[in-house]
Amino acid sequence: DEEFFGQPAFPLGPMPPKRPATAAPSERRLKQYRGSVLLYCNGKRHEIAAADAQMTLLEWLRSEGYTGTKLGCGEGGCGACTVVLSSRGDGSEVRHSAVNACLMPVCAADWCMVTTVEGIGSSRRGEVHPIQERLAALHGSQCGFCTPGIVMALYAALRTSPDMCVTPRCVESGSREKRGGELRACTPSERAHSHQR
Ligand code: FES
């Protein structure tokens, strides 16, 4: 967990192991992974046999019960489906990215760790992440449909850049891409983001 997050607050389980050094991006790798997808979601290992190449990550997540991730526009515009994808790439350093699960094929998450909003905290478990706690306590959302996306976009940004400023001025002055591009139809940016610090 330490190696994965570098922060012990919410241990989410193991990452897939580092790829063998000999597994270069080549036909050999394609043969090695053809027919099944291995990913971890919120620390749980999933092996998807005969993965459907047309299935999106969002469809797969919801079919597996990770329903905190929402389907809004379905075309990459609203950010309600935002999850955090963590992978090692070709190096050993883990990279965390906010992705739109409605656009990403589940096959593209092979050998990656997916973190959904349930993974960082849940009121049912009595354990919420500070981002969730502050949004809820300070009324940072309205209908709440896109709130999981906001939470995950902020989580990815803070995970990547712990010192990032997320005050309203900085958010509005150009860090939209760091929020994963989420678009709030009802909640003003100032309201959602002024409570993050
Ligand atoms: Fe709107 Fe994915 S559902 S960006």
Image (spheres, grey):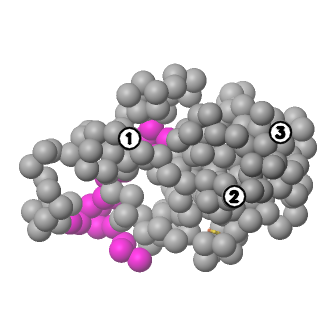
Which marked residue is nearer to the observer: mark 2 or mark 1? 2
Q: Residue drawn 42% across and 24% down? A: 2
Q: Position of residue 73 (x, y in %)?
A: 68, 75
Determine which of the numbered discs, if any, sits on residue 174 in the image: 2
- In this picture, is 28 found above or below 76? above
Q: Choose between 12 and 99: the one closer to the eye.
A: 99
For the point 61% across and 72% down, the residue is 76
Q: Secondary structure at mark 1?
A: loop
* Mark 2 or mark 1: whose residue is earlier in sequence: 1
Kind of residue sitting beneath label 1: Val
Q: In the rendered view, would you say 178 is above or below 184?
A: above
Q: Which mark is residue 195?
A: 3
Q: CA distance from mark 2 to mark 3?
A: 18 Å
What amino acid type is highlighted by mark number 2?
A: Gly
For label 2, count other residues whose C-alpha is less than 10 Å away and answer few (under 14), some (14-19) or many (20+): few
For the question of whether residue 118 can be seen, the reply is no
Residue type, numbered disc 3: His
Left or right: where 158 falls relative to 171: left
Examine the rendering and report whether any part of residue 176 can be seen.
Answer: yes
Nearer the viewer's eye, disc 2 or disc 3?
2
- Separation of disc 3 and disc 1 at Cα? 28 Å
Q: Which residue is mark 1?
A: 94
Q: Do the residues under discs 3 and 1 have CB atoms within 8 angstroms?
A: no
- Mark 3: secondary structure: loop
Say which label, 3 or 1, has the lower sequence index: 1
In magenta, the rendered stretch is: 34-54
